Amino acid sequence: MWKVIIADDEKLICRLVEALVDWEGLGLEIVGKAVNGLEALELVKDKQPNILITDIRMPGCDGLELIRQARELCSDIEIVIISGYAHFEYAQTAIAYGVGNYILKPIKQDELNETLQKIVSRLKDNHKSSLDKENDHQNSRNDLKRLREGLIKDVLDESREFTVSELKQNYHFHVEEGILQAFVLKIDFDPEKTGEPAFSIIMQKAEELFLAGVPPVCTESLLTFRGFAGYGILNYLPERRDEVRHRMREFLRQMEASKNLFGKVEFSIGLGRAAGDVTELADSMEEARLAVEERLIEGCGRMLEGTALSNGIDKQPLLEKYAKTVEHAIEVLDEKEAMLADDHLKSAVMGIPNIRGREILEIVLDAGKLFVLRMGNKHTGKLQQEFEFRCRQCSMVEGIFKELYVLQEKIISEAKTVRENEATRPIRIAKQMIMENYGRNVTLDEVCDAVGFSSAYFSAMFKKETGEGFSKYLTRVRIDKAKELLRETNMSVAEVCEAVGYNDRKHFTQTFHKMTGVNPAEFRRLYG
């Protein structure tokens, strides 16, 4: 029996959940009930349950904190969250912790039982069996899954013609006469705000909705994920074409309906050509990939079909003009001037009649590469990869141009920091030499030899950075140190004079008085 704990601050909800489920029939046993988060957490520690059903809002230790700590205590625990419509933002946070089972109030018996049944199935699948037969079966299923996923990889990477027998023998994808059609489910989101646990839940939900709706009207189907997109292949009879299209639209509609739970995320589907021959499979996939790029102009939440012919835009003049405009910004490291170059490129690109989404993406990616190369950043490859990744996660044109501006601003800012550090390095060396040698006759020529500049150039630089000349700065350091020694030690004035680099006590006293308004002995009486 799988162990269950129910947690809700409303006892009536606890009793309702208990009454709605055929616990024994599902192989489940309620081992504890709690009316607050702290009590529930103690039960989790004590009972080590397989399933926790909890309200998202509770006193003592709220549902989110309970989920987090329960995960730490039982890493494999399955969690079902109960939430009202007003608490969707809490459900989103729970999903970020990897919780994919949620039920909205008022609780429906069918939904609760179906959710628990799916969880029990997962628990059984994940349970490590000691039987070799089960291990062999699991290995076989994993091998089959890898084979079928390999078909998507090869279609994308090789873009070659396939045969029916090859699909069957090499990929276990059994094609029958009819139509082959590829599709791409594009998932756009900010990777910094939606982590891997949440994306795993999104993929799980997509697979669940796809399998429930599309395969029943196909003779063969496949959906697998690469990166942050799902790639699929459909094989169906010609007379079912309209029904397949309807099922695909419904699949997208259901993903859109649930997207609020995942945070800021957008879904779009690109549909390739309906091919009558397996040799056209790679072409269908390429069309699906290009079609989904049109969401940048058409908008997300759509099923995009066909690939209108390219305008045959000559990108070179656009990029050359951008390079010329941004050149001075790079030279003087001016972010605002670089942004103007970005704006000019955007105006020029968006002014082209009937421009395609994929064409805009290509131009902006090329502009970003050009900017990185012109800046000569040592992390060129990494910056280009990150830029392309972020652009491909944008769901609209505005976002792509914003990414170009962010790239420009980041690189220019880093270059400014490097340039400033290089410019101030000699000053830092000089200050360090003064601090370490104020007790002797440290000279300007000695410091200039150390930093490799002429005395005239260095003196001008030093005054510009510190606001005072070298001699005055050295004198201030010596007098500040003398004040410290007079306050904190029993050294005589003569000893202090010598300690801070003065051989002439009279000169020391005059300088001290000039800078403090009192002589050394008076300073000690006042502040010692």
Image: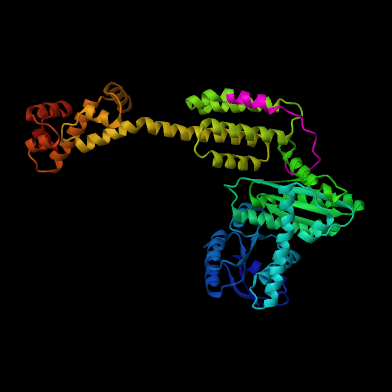
Q: Quadrant of the N terminus?
A: bottom right
Viewer-proximal residue among 220 and 282: 282
Q: Quadrant of the C terminus?
A: top left
Q: Is 404 above or below relative to 75?
A: above
Residue drawn 61% across and 65% down? Answer: 8
Res. 181 visible in picture:
yes
Residue 332 drawn in magenta: no
Please state if 210 lies on the left or on the right of 384 as rendered: right
Please state if 372 lies on the left or on the right of 104 as rendered: left
Viewer-proximal residue among 491 and 70: 491
The extreme right residue here reads 239
Residue drawn 55% across and 40% down? Answer: 381
Total numbered badges shown on the rendered structure: 0
Please state if 234 lies on the left or on the right of 382 as rendered: right
Residue 220 % position (x, y): 83, 58
Res. 299 visible in picture:
no
Residue 183 % position (x, y): 77, 48
Residue 189 % position (x, y): 64, 46
Magenta stretch? Answer: 300-323
Viewer-proximal residue among 474 and 384: 384
Please state if 283 lies on the left or on the right of 389 as rendered: right
Residue drawn 56% across and 31% down? Answer: 371
Residue 469 % position (x, y): 25, 24
Residue 304 drawn in magenta: yes
Q: Is 164 above or below relative to 4?
A: above
